[in-house]
Image (tube, rainbow, N blue to C red):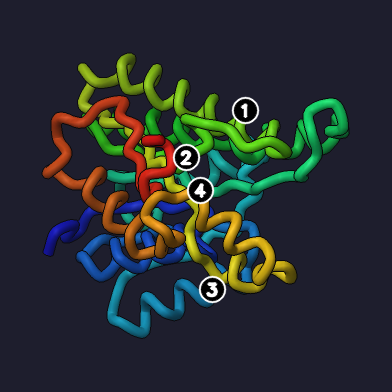
Amino acid sequence: MRFQDKVVLVTGAGSGIGAGVAQAFARAGARVMLADINAEQGQQCLAAIEAEGGQAAFFQVDVTSAAQMRELVSATVSRFGRLDIVHNNAGISGSNDFTADIEEAEFDRVVAVNLKAVWMCMKYAMEQMLKQGGGVIVNTASALALTVLPGSATYNATKHAVAGLTKTAAVEYASRNIRINAICPGVIRTAMLNNHPNLAELEPKLVALHPIGRLGEVEEVVKAVLWLASEEASFMHGSLVTVDGGWTAH
């Protein structure tokens, strides 16, 4: 199997892209630590993996807590013996306010989840990977790491910052056998989007952003993440891989 006996940590694994990635790694032979703040969703993902005969565990975590993030990595190593791959995926969208209308507490909340937590996960994972002699990290950035949407200033800013963090760390640790890249998805059809109360009005506007004429599917992002995590992408360091239906190309 493609990832036989590899140990993978996925944050934001309870739903959407994270759940899809976690299940795909498990199907490919990996042992997966699922991390999410939502225990019910995390346990559902765990049950889905175990129902298919996969190996996984769930760890409830607030990604904004340094102590909990440190413990997450420690628990992964204690359970599975090492840490080979991280999909650093947890994130939130934040408010739709224009820049001057954003409240400080909201700004701090989005930065804590979308940027600081990404850095903390990288930090503690890399400490373990350096002990082992290497590893792979795939961060979830966004098409909005490469362009912007009005009314998403904090989200735009944090995803641009994740791109910068990804590239910086990739350069710093390439010689130490840690590969770090990021995916930049467009708008992906997840359960959260499908349950949006204004989906009928919102969807045509979102589709119009993508020259392909449709939204992305979770499985399309999953394939990109697994490829970046595989040896097939061994010469990829510091890359921002768009999975966005052409959004950022025009």
Query: Label 3 belongs to which residue?
Result: 43
Residue type at the position of mark 4 = Leu
Q: Which of 211 and 151 is in front in this view?
A: 211
Mark pair 4, 2: CA separation: 11 Å
Earlier in the chain: of badge 4 and badge 1, it is 1
Query: Label 1 belongs to which residue?
Result: 157
Query: Label 2 belongs to which residue?
Result: 143
Query: Mark 1, mark 3: which one is toward the viewer?
Result: 1
Residue type at the position of mark 3 = Gln
Q: What residue lies at 56% left-to-right and 41% top-to-bottom?
A: 69
Q: Where is residue 206 in the image (x, y as percent from the top left)?
A: 56, 55
Q: What residue lies at 79% left-to-right and 34% top-to-bottom?
A: 98
Name the element at disc 4: loop
Mark pair 3, 4: CA separation: 34 Å
The numbered mark at residue 121 is: none
Corner quadrant of residue 242: top left
In the displayed structure, would residue 174 be above or below residue 206? above
